[in-house]
Image: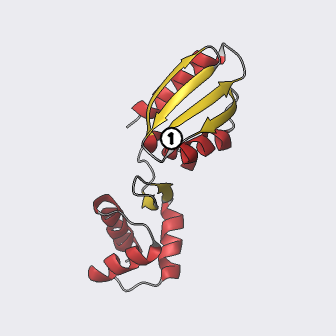
Amino acid sequence: MIKDRRRAIADILRQYRICTQEDLVTLLSERGYSVTQATISRDMREMGLVKIPDDEDGYRYVLPDDGRSLSKEEHIIREFVVGAEGSGNLIVIKTMPGAAQGVGAAFDMLCWSEVMGTIAGDDTIFIALRTLEDLRALLDRIKDLLEEY
């Protein structure tokens, strides 16, 4: 029963934009699962679901990747970064509109050794690098992260 319910949760997350646990409880009940929010909370935690910002000025739950396990921060970067280029000891990251603050915070929380700090606007982030040599290393790291789909 737990396994079936969790399959249903994964299916719902692939089909719908789920912003709250209540949304998930409602859709599960429509599929015949009578669950409490506490049960859903436990399922979500054990399934490793991630709550990320979306492009509709809110947040939504997503499934963890089936491949290598990404951190929440890496998932945010992967989901919302649309491009990156650099010069000297500065990288400019372009994001989906409204996502730069969350992506900038994700870079900060990752504590990657190359990153000295970030400044984020609406859809652009400036990343200050520790050394000039860090430019290629960080651009490669970002490129690898974005290409792992």
Q: Quadrant of residue 113?
A: top right
Horizontal relation, residue 93 to residue 32: left or right: right
Is 2 drawn above or below residue 59 in the view shown? below
**For residue 81, what is the image quadrant?**
top left
Task: Specify whether residue 133 is in view.
Answer: yes
The number of discs equals 1
The residue depicted at 56 percent of the width and 34 percent of the height is 125
**Label 1 residue SS:** helix
Q: Position of residue 54 (x, y in %)?
A: 43, 54
Who's the residue at 48% across and 70% down the image?
Answer: 43
Up the image or down, 100 lies above or below 16; here it is above
Q: Residue at x 59, y 39 (%)?
A: 120
Q: Kindly identify the residue that appears in the image at 37 percent across and 37 percent down.
A: 149
- Figure coloring: secondary structure
Asked where in the image residue 45 lies, by quadrant, the reply is bottom right
Q: Is residue 128 above or below residue 34?
A: above
Nearest to the observer: residue 30 or residue 127: 127
- Residue 48 image offset from top left, x and y in percent: 51, 59
Image height of 141 relative to 99, above or below: above
Judged left or right of residue 56, residue 122 is right
- Give the percent coordinates (x, y) of residue 86: 54, 19
What crowding class fits label 1: few (fewer than 14 Cα within 10 Å), some (14-19), or many (20 or more)? many
The N terminus lies in quadrant: bottom left
Residue 69 visible in the picture: no
The residue that label 1 is drawn on is 77
Give percent across and percent down for residue 103. 55, 43
Q: Amino acid at mark 1?
A: Ile
